[in-house]
Image (cartoon, rainbow, N blue to C red):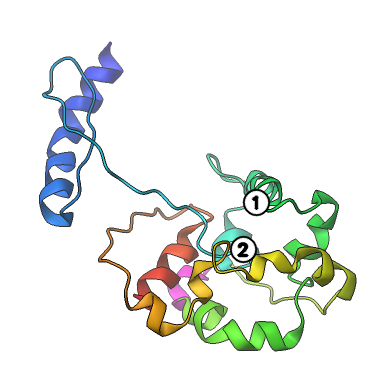
Amino acid sequence: MFQTFHFLETHHGLCCHLCKESDSVVLAVGSDLPKIRAQILIYVALQALDFQPPSYQQNKNVPLLRQNLAFYCRCGYLDISPSWKSTVLKGAHLPVEVWEKYRKWLGAENIPEKFKKRGYVPHAPLDETAYLETNIILDLTNSPLIADDEVVSQLPKACIVSCEYDILQDHSLLYKKRL
């Protein structure tokens, strides 16, 4: 009971602020608060091409979303065999020309240096067989960050929330930059 009350007491103002400032509807459930209807889209993975941005490397073992769990969830969703894990996590599953095509949007140089302070290791060379098995990740449904500028420019304003030790922090930064 204490945790529920404490959460409601401390986060009610934040929920109200998010509703007003982002033109969104937020759900706060609790016996002491009026109900607010929800209509929120949560899209955690904005690209499936690169499992090696700095935040993935630096925060791969930080709870709640560990790199292994994110990888297995993505493989399950895309029907890709998890046996490609080491190849995909090294970034060796796409040809150089694919990386170069999307570098302007997904390259580590798009992440500010302050977010790479704990190190970053670039991609490994291509494994052609892995590419043939995993190229479904190039579909825009699976990697919306690689959509053309004309498509991205039509997206609505967004409230992006991430935290320092989130493996998806770089996705948030890249999405912000694209918008």
Q: Would you say residue 113 sits in the magenta stretch?
A: yes
Tags 1 and 2 in contact by the CB under 8 Å rule?
yes
> Secondary structure beneath disc 2?
loop
Instruction: Name which residue lies at 42% across and 63% down.
Output: 172
> Secondary structure beneath disc 1?
helix
The image position of residue 138, as x and y in percent, is 64, 71
Magenta part of the chain: 112-117
Question: Residue 101 lies in what quarter of the image?
Answer: bottom right
Q: For residue 48, which numbered disc appears in the image?
A: 2
Question: Residue 57 lies in what quarter of the image?
Answer: bottom right
Q: Is residue 156 left or right of residue 81?
A: left
The image position of residue 177, as x and y in percent, is 38, 76
Q: For residue 148, which numbered disc appears in the image?
A: none
The image position of residue 38, as x and y in percent, is 25, 37
Q: Would you say residue 80 sits in the magenta stretch?
A: no
Instruction: Name which residue lies at 55% across and 69% down.
Output: 140
For the N terminus, the image quarter is: top left
**Residue highlighted by disc 1:** 74
Residue 64 against residue 136 in the figure, above or below: above
Instruction: Name which residue lies at 22% across and 40% down.
Output: 26
Residue 108 against residue 130 in the figure, above or below: below
**In the foreground, 117 or 54:** 54
